[in-house]
Every structure is written in structure tokens, then in C-alpha cells.
């Protein structure tokens, strides 16, 4: 099947396939082609250009589109790449939401058996089949909101059997939905109650019992650690990341959400982590560590907003020349939303990022944070044909500006229109 989208008011994030990330001041620039067309075939982007030149496009005329969409007055974006989610979980945690309103902190809720431990109990009592059904609803939801690639973490199992259960559900989602899915093993998400006074023994279990089985069954693409106060130390994190690397699992880090001195960023850079995520409590030391590295700093403004945490220093990071990615952190406790359009708006309103900067942060840079920017995250010939068409809107900036409006009209994954009833 081939698809031609014509009369596009603005074709957003066009460029060269070789560009893998955007850094510093360049983040304020987004190539947008006006009065454009986009030709998709075989699940890939085959060509694009100005409507004035369409008659000269041999791809369009030799192949002959089987479907044509008129996008007059509309914009076409590459699909969002959400590089940090926990959307495979059981139940919900709205009672903790009420506790937060009453003034309890994230750590106080965790100490009372809430937080990650609460989700682990719920997941343990949920069958793999039910867990898949619940998670399928969520992944369908985010697809309809424009996400075409998503990283999903385990971490609500906290024992070998339940971590494997989560990772099998993630694999099944990948098999059954057209969205690109990357799987991350996050056994070191929290210390289980039975290991409360034996944290190092739990680290040993993650390294010696979980990682080898997960690697042998090819259930994960990456490995992650929650390196922060009250969770796992720099030493724990280094041990786990090194063990993961031996099995081909590159690291990703939860860092500096709770403490300025977690050392998570520096540890991530030291072990060449693909991304370090959260970073609400970060300063010049973290910026210096990230400068010149291959590690993508990834901010999760939905979590900072929902938990009332300090906003990470996005402006300072960009002005220092760093790239930035934004992700939803979709999870039941600290960011119960996978709406990446809302994440863009929070990036503008809370983090003082320009509309162009948030576009780069949720497309090409977040694709980089998933290890897929060669194939996703921009409109480039040869990339996967994951795009969405907006409703009619007056400008590019209107998209994050209208933070409460559903502006996505048509979702296209692998070159085919995705039905909202799917």
C-alpha cells in the first residue's frame, strides 16, 4: 500500500536521516516545509517536498498512491517517541493521589508501603493475561494521542517471576501493536520489603538470577537503575550496569529526582548510559558531566508537575549546549498520563522551552534516548512512516499552546492509518 498526503500546511521536522540528535541552540530550529506533500510506501517515507514540485517526483508517479489524504490547513508531525514509561502495571494508585493532596511526600508514601511497593503487590496478584489486557488499553490510548514509539520498563515485579511476567507482557504488546516498542529491565526500581536490611543481597539477585534469564530469553533491550536517595547507590548502580553490559544491555538511569547528590548522572555517563532521566535536582556538576558525552538527558515534566517537585533546569542545560529529550514517565504513581502533547505544553510553560525546542525534545532527541533515531523521530527518506496529521490550526506554536485541545486528526503507523477503534 502507498499513501500520499498532499496540501500539507506545514510538514514538521524534515531533514537528513544522518542527524541523530539536536543540541543546545540548534534545538530552537525545526525545519518545516510549507504547502508540502509526503509520500509513504512499504511502511517507509519514500519522498516529500513542496506541492509545487510534486509533478516532478518520480516516486509518486512511478508507484502511484493507493490512498490520498488532503491535509489542507493541517500540519504533519513525525510521531512522538516516548522514551520513558512504566505503562505495564496493574490497577491504579489514586488513593496515594489523595495522600499527596494531604501533604505526604513521595518518600513518606513509600515508607508506608505505598509507591512502587504498592504497585508490586498489585502486579503480583494479577495474572499475566489480565496484565496484558490492562496494558493494551494504555498502549492503544497513547497511539491515538500521537505516540509511534515507546520505551516500556519493568520494575513493578521486584522478584524474578514477576519481572519476567512484566517483560513477557511488553513483548506481547510489541508483537500485537504497530507501534515501535523498546523494553527495559528495571529490576532495581526499589528494594523489596523482604530485602529491606539486605539491599546488597537484592542487587546480587538482580545480577545473578534475573539478568542472565532475561538476556537468554531476549526480553529486554536496555537495563535501568533507580539511583537516588533511599533506593540504589552509585556502587549498586555501577555493579548492575556492568552486569547488564556483559549481556549486551546498555544502561539507562533514573537520577536526581530526589537528591542533588545522588551521583546517578555521573554514574550513567561513566558507564555510557543511553539516557539519564528525571534530573529534577540537577546543577552544574551534572551539566558538566553530560557535556560532550553520548548520554541523553531526559526530563519528565509530568512527574515533576504531579508530585510538586522542582522543575529541572532545562533552560540552563540547553544554554550550556546540551541536547534534551522529554518523555511522559507514564506510570500509576507519579505521572498517570501518556499524553505527549501535554508534555510538550509543560515543557513550554514550566521549563520555559520554546515550541521548537519541545518538538525536537519529543521527536528526534527522544528517539535518540531509545536508540532509534536512525529510523524514527523525523521526516526523512527511508525512515519508518510513523506520522500524525493535526486538525486545522493556525501555526506550529498553536500545538503546545492549546494544551487542553485534542488536535490530532489522523494517526499513521508504518504507512497505514491507525483506526481509533483498534
Image (spheres, rainbow, N blue to C red):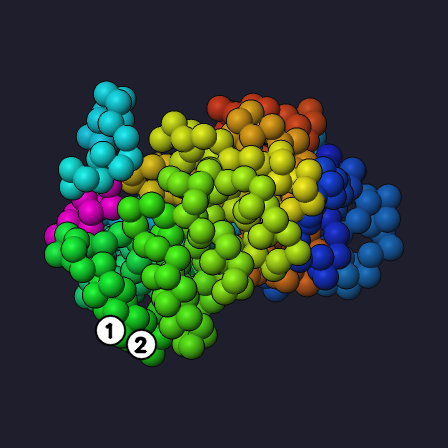
Q: Residue 220: x and y, percent?
A: 38, 67
Q: Which mark is residue 212?
A: 2
Q: Residue 148: x and y, percent?
A: 51, 50
How many marks overall?
2
Q: Which mark is residue 156?
A: none
Q: Nearer the viewer, residue 41 or 293?
A: 293
**How much space separates mark 2 and mark 1, taking CA atoms?**
6 Å
Q: Residue 264: x and y, percent?
A: 44, 52
Q: Residue 311: x and y, percent?
A: 49, 31
Given contact means CB atoms under 8 Å apart, are the residues at marks 2 and 1 in contact? yes
- 299 vs 120, left or right, is right
On-image quarter of the N terminus = bottom right
Q: Residues within 10 Å of mark 1 (few under 14, many from 20)?
A: some
For the stretch drawn in magenta, what is the main secondary structure?
helix
Instruction: Note whether residue 268 is visible.
Output: yes
When the figure is inspected, residue 177 is found, relative to residue 399, above or below; the finding is below
- As for residue 123 lying within the magenta part, the answer is yes
- As for residue 378 lying within the magenta part, the answer is no
Q: Residue at x 69, y 38 (%)?
A: 319
Q: Which residues are magenta?
A: 114-126
- 335 vs 295, left or right, is left
Q: Residue at x 32, y 54 (%)?
A: 232
Q: Which residue is mark 1?
A: 209
Image quadrant assignment for residue 249:
bottom left
In the image, farthest residue toward the top: 102
Q: Nearer the viewer, residue 291 or 134?
A: 291
Q: Residue at x 52, y 29 (%)?
A: 346
What element does badge 2 sit on? Answer: helix
Amino acid at each position: 500500500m502507498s499513501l500520499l498526503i498532499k496540501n500539507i500546511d506545514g510538514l514538521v521536522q524534515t531533514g537528513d536521516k544522518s542527524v541523530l540528535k539536536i543540541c543546545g541552540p540548534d534545538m530552537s530550529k525545526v525545519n518545516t516545509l510549507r504547502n508540502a506533500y509526503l509520500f509513504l510506501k512499504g511502511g517507509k517515507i519514500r519522498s516529500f517536498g513542496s506541492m509545487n514540485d510534486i509533478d516532478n517526483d518520480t516516486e509518486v508517479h512511478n508507484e502511484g498512491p493507493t490512498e490520498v489524504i488532503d491535509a489542507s490547513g493541517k500540519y504533519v508531525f513525525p510521531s512522538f517517541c516516548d522514551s520513558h514509561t512504566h505503562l505495564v502495571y496493574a490497577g491504579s494508585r489514586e488513593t496515594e493521589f489523595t495522600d499527596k493532596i494531604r501533604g505526604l511526600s513521595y518518600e513518606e508514601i513509600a515508607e508506608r508501603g505505598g509507591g512502587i511497593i504498592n504497585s508490586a503487590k498489585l502486579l503480583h496478584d494479577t495474572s499475566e493475561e489480565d496484565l496484558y489486557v490492562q496494558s493494551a488499553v494504555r498502549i492503544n490510548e497513547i497511539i491515538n494521542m500521537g505516540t509511534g514509539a515507546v520505551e516500556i520498563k519493568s520494575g513493578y515485579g521486584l522478584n524474578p517471576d514477576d519481572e519476567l511476567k512484566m517483560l513477557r507482557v511488553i513483548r506481547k504488546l510489541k508483537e500485537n501493536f504497530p507501534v515501535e516498542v523498546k523494553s527495559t529491565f528495571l529490576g532495581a526500581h526499589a528494594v523489596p520489603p523482604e530485602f529491606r536490611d539486605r539491599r546488597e543481597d537484592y542487587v546480587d539477585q538482580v545480577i545473578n538470577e534475573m539478568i542472565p534469564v532475561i538476556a537468554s530469553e531476549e526480553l529486554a533491550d536496555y537495563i535501568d537503575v533507580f539511583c537516588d536517595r533511599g533506593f540504589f547507590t552509585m556502587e549498586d548502580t555501577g555493579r548492575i550496569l556492568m552486569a547488564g553490559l556483559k549481556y549486551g544491555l546498555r544502561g539507562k538511569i533514573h537520577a536526581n529526582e530526589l537528591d542533588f547528590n545522588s551521583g546517578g548522572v555521573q554514574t550513567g555517563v561513566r558507564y555510557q548510559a543511553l539516557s539519564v532521566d528525571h534530573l529534577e535536582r540537577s546543577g552544574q556538576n551534572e551539566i558538566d558531566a553530560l557535556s560532550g558525552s553520548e548520554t541523553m538527558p531526559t526530563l519528565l515534566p509530568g512527574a515533576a508537575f504531579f508530585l510538586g517537585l522542582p522543575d529541572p533546569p532545562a533552560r540552563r542545560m540547553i544554554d550550556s549546549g546540551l541536547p534534551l529529550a522529554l518523555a511522559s514517565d507514564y506510570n500509576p504513581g507519579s505521572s498517570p498520563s501518556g499524553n505527549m502533547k501535554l508534555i510538550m505544553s509543560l515543557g513550554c510553560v514550566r521549563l520555559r522551552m520554546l515550541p521548537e525546542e519541545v518538538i525536537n525534545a519529543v521527536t528526534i532527541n527522544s528517539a535518540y534516548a531509545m536508540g532509534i533515531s536512525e529510523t524514527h523521530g523525523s521526516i526523512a527518506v527511508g525512515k519508518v512512516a510513523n506520522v500524525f496529521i493535526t486538525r486545522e490550526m493556525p501555526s506550529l506554536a498553536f500545538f503546545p499552546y492549546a494544551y487542553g485541545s485534542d488536535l490530532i486528526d489522523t494517526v499513521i503507523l508504518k504507512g497505514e492509518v491507525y483506526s481509533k477503534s483498534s
